[in-house]
Image: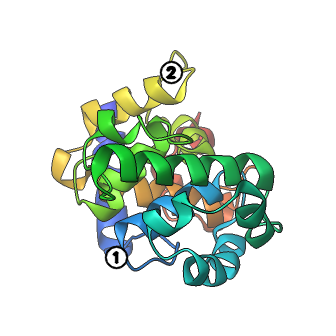
């Protein structure tokens, strides 16, 4: 099967069977989403969603969080993985937002990556989820699924290389939605251990199954 055919069949299946695909993080504005994404690194969305209501209640704006101590922020996120490092990131990104962006979360990948704790993946999630821009964030799920199903070649050994190959083959209008298709598929079907191949809707075109 040609790679172009695999893309066509699988994208069509997702489009028909998962027409609504979106982030499972809870948020009400750009700042809350940014904080939630930072907290979600190596942590489940479920745990983040259990933690953020109290955090957002105490620190509703970048201005308020910028004036909080790392210790106070950490106390609110102690059930999250790496709470001390993430507390430092949250304080730092809040201070940078206030100092350099008038408290407004920027909407470009270069400006987002100027914020402490915000790498390319986090920046791309903000662009795709909040700002509705064409972006392909590559987390562990997307990285794994893209390789397994044959969307990317073995030469794509880094998240950035996977992002580039996916972006070259997926229509720009579907790129952000495709991120969620691959992420959710990896989270619930194409899991790291014991993928549910027997009941997978795209098994007919999956390289992992057909190789």
Q: Which mark is residue 177?
A: none
Q: Is residue 127 left or right of residue 195?
A: left
Q: Which image quadrant is residue 170 in?
A: top left
Percent of width and height locating residue 69: 69, 58
Identify the mark at residue 20; answer none if there is no mark: 1
Which residue does the numbered mark 2 point to in the structure image? Answer: 156
Left or right position of 111 against 26: left
In this picture the colour scheme is rainbow
Residue at 56% x, 61% y is 67
x then y, percent, for residue 40: 63, 59
What residue is shown at x 50% (from left), y 21% (from top)?
156
Q: Is residue 141 left or right of residue 5?
A: right
Disc 2/disc 1 C-alpha distance (Å): 28 Å
Q: Give the secondary structure at mark 1.
A: loop
Residue in view at x 36 percent, y 74 percent: 29
In front of the other: 201 or 84: 84
Q: Residues within 10 Å of mark 2 (few under 14, many from 20)?
A: some
Q: Residue at x 61, y 47 (%)?
A: 89
């Amino acid at each position: 099967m040609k790679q172009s055919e695999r893309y066509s069949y699988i994208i069509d299946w997702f489009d028909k069977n998962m027409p609504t695909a979106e982030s499972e993080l809870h948020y009400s504005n750009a700042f809350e989403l940014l904080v939630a994404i930072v907290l979600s690194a190596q942590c489940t969305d479920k745990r983040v969603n259990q933690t953020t209501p109290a955090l957002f209640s105490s620190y509703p704006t970048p201005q308020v969080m910028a004036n909080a101590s790392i210790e106070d922020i950490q106390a609110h996120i102690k059930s999250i993985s790496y709470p001390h490092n993430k507390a430092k990131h949250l304080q730092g990104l809040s201070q940078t937002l206030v100092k350099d962006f008038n408290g407004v979360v920027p909407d470009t990948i270069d400006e987002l990556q100027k914020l402490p704790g915000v790498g390319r993946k986090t920046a791309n999630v903000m662009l795709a989820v909040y700002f509705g821009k064409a972006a392909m964030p590559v987390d562990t799920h997307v990285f794994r699924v893209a390789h397994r199903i044959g969307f990317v070649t073995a030469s794509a050994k880094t998240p950035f290389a996977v992002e580039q190959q996916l972006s070259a083959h997926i229509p720009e209008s579907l790129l952000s939605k495709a991120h969620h298709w691959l992420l959710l598929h990896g989270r619930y079907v194409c899991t790291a251990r014991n993928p549910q191949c027997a009941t997978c809707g795209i098994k007919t075109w999956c390289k992992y199954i057909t190789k």
